[in-house]
Image (cartoon, rainbow, N blue to C red):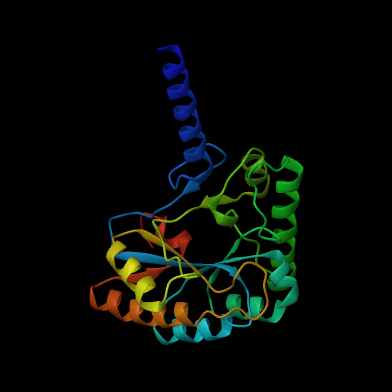
Amino acid sequence: MLWQAGGAAVAAAAGAMAWAVHGRSSTVFGPSVYRGVRNRRAIALTFDDGPSESTLQLLDVLEQAQAPATFFFCGANVRRLPAVAREVARRGHELGNHSDSHDWFCLRSASFIRDEVVRAQGAITDATGVTPVLLRAPYGVRWFGLGEVQRQLGLTGVMWTEIGLDWKLPAEGIYRRLARAAQNGAIFCLHDGRETRPNPDIRPTLEAVRRLLSELRARGFHFETVSQILCPTT
């Protein structure tokens, strides 16, 4: 029947749009990656929503394991805690752009998206002296206009192979979720902040990361930044 065919077409179009907006392999709205090369036993740990008051604890955990990571900063958090942002860079971790206010890009104007990305880029560069070349959209949601600002600023979009759901799971759940997903070239998404809220409780993340670093080292993995894991050789 015609109405059934029409309904199926609408559902298919909605599904295609949902994948374009949030699909990890989608490049519809701009250049984007979700995993690195598979020819070596490496994993990239990434942390969103920082810097926060808890970031320094995470840096100590990573330093003990000699594990470089990539931190996707919110501009508002960088302006609030510039010294923490500088410390992340000083310890050799990679910095990425995670927008200014961590607001949704979906259904927003191109000018809104541009302002969010440009303001964060400026805040990160001003505070740390590092100009990011990577971008992770808030919630992993891309939209019209994002690709143009990526091209203008030289930013590659980064999704993830697996996300830890560490804002809602206990440490055991976070650890098991990521340990199961470990594979050559995997990019894992975790959080050292909670959007732009001050003083976030990231204790489950810290515990899970400690266990994960030990477990994955024992399984023969090493850790790289996103830029490193995208390269055929390091």
Q: Position of residue 174 (x, y in %)?
A: 39, 71
> Taking 183 as reference, is 198 above or below it?
below
- Asked if residue 27 can be seen in this view, the reply is no
* Residue occupying the point 60% across, 51% down: 155
Q: Position of residue 96 (x, y in %)?
A: 59, 62
| 76 sits to left or right of 161 | right
Foreground residue among 101 and 4: 4
| 178 sits to left or right of 106 | left
Q: Position of residue 150 (x, y in %)?
A: 63, 46
| 150 sits to left or right of 208 | right
* Residue occupying the point 61% across, 41% down: 143
Q: Position of residue 126 (x, y in %)?
A: 75, 68
Q: Quadrant of the C terminus?
A: bottom left
Counting labels gives 0
> Taking 88 as reference, is 143 above or below it?
above
Foreground residue among 37 and 8: 8
